[in-house]
Image (cartoon, rainbow, N blue to C red):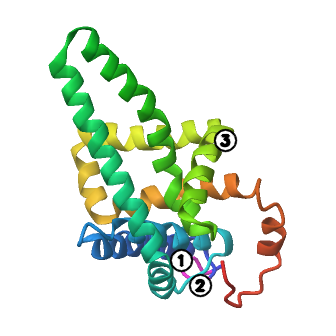
Amino acid sequence: MNLFSFNSWISRFLYLVADIVLFHILWIIFSLPVVTIGASTTALYYCCMKRIRRDEGYITRNFLQAFKANFKQSTLIWLFILLTGAILFIDFRIGMAAGGAIGRFILISCSVLLIPFFCTALYIFPVQAKFENRIIDNLKNAFLMSLSNFLFTLLLIFIIATFLLLAFTFPPFIGLMMIAGMGIYAYLSSGIYICVFRKYIPEELKEDAEATGIDREY
């Protein structure tokens, strides 16, 4: 068997590496205005999940289509996350500065609110990429999925923690993150989200197995 033939494991691995780098580059380019990070992240997960489910190419085309289709809702969601995060951060600072019973009350209240905020933020953009719903419905579903799939949520947190730990303790890892960081994280986490979503769309596995290679709506 020719190791460098189109279907060889080496060729498939190299294609995957190239796709992950492209994921990362596209995400950075379309996130540069900052306000578009939500739409860019949604498009990233859309492409990654398609790549994993059906080994589908056309990454740039799929990214652009998903970015455009989800721009409004994803941007509003991103702004909501930024605003909520800023409020929680300011409240934490106030609680730390206040001290005493009032300070402790503020810190405890913020800590309680931080958990659903983080869990929702962890799932919201993959949910937005997968399901066509109102913003409030996707936010609610993202939070409920994070709780009902707690082991998967822990695995996602573990991946994030591992990335952060390597970034602070292993300098070469920072170079890798600059080249393909978001692509690597999105690809790894997309596999988890696919497992979660198939609990709610059980027929998807059969559809993927029967896919003929003709482009279909995700």
The residue under label 1 is 11
**Residue drawn at 44 percent across, 41 percent down:** 118
| Residue 51 image point, x, y percent | 58, 73
- Residue type pointed to by label 3: Asn
* 1 and 3 marks in contact (CB < 8 Å): no
Quadrant into which the C terminus falls:
bottom right
The residue under label 3 is 149
Secondary structure type for disc 1: helix
**Residue drawn at 54 percent across, 54 percent down:** 139
Quadrant into which the N terminus falls:
bottom right
Residue 78 vertical placement versus 209 (above, below) = above
Report whether 46 appears left or right of 26.
right
Looking at the rendered image, the disc whose residue lies closer to the viewer, 1 or 3, is 3
Q: CA distance from mark 1 to mark 3?
A: 35 Å
Among the 4 quarters of the image, the one containing residue 55: bottom right
Secondary structure type for disc 3: loop
The residue under label 2 is 6
Among the 4 quarters of the image, the one containing residue 211: bottom right
Q: Residue furthest bottom?
A: 214
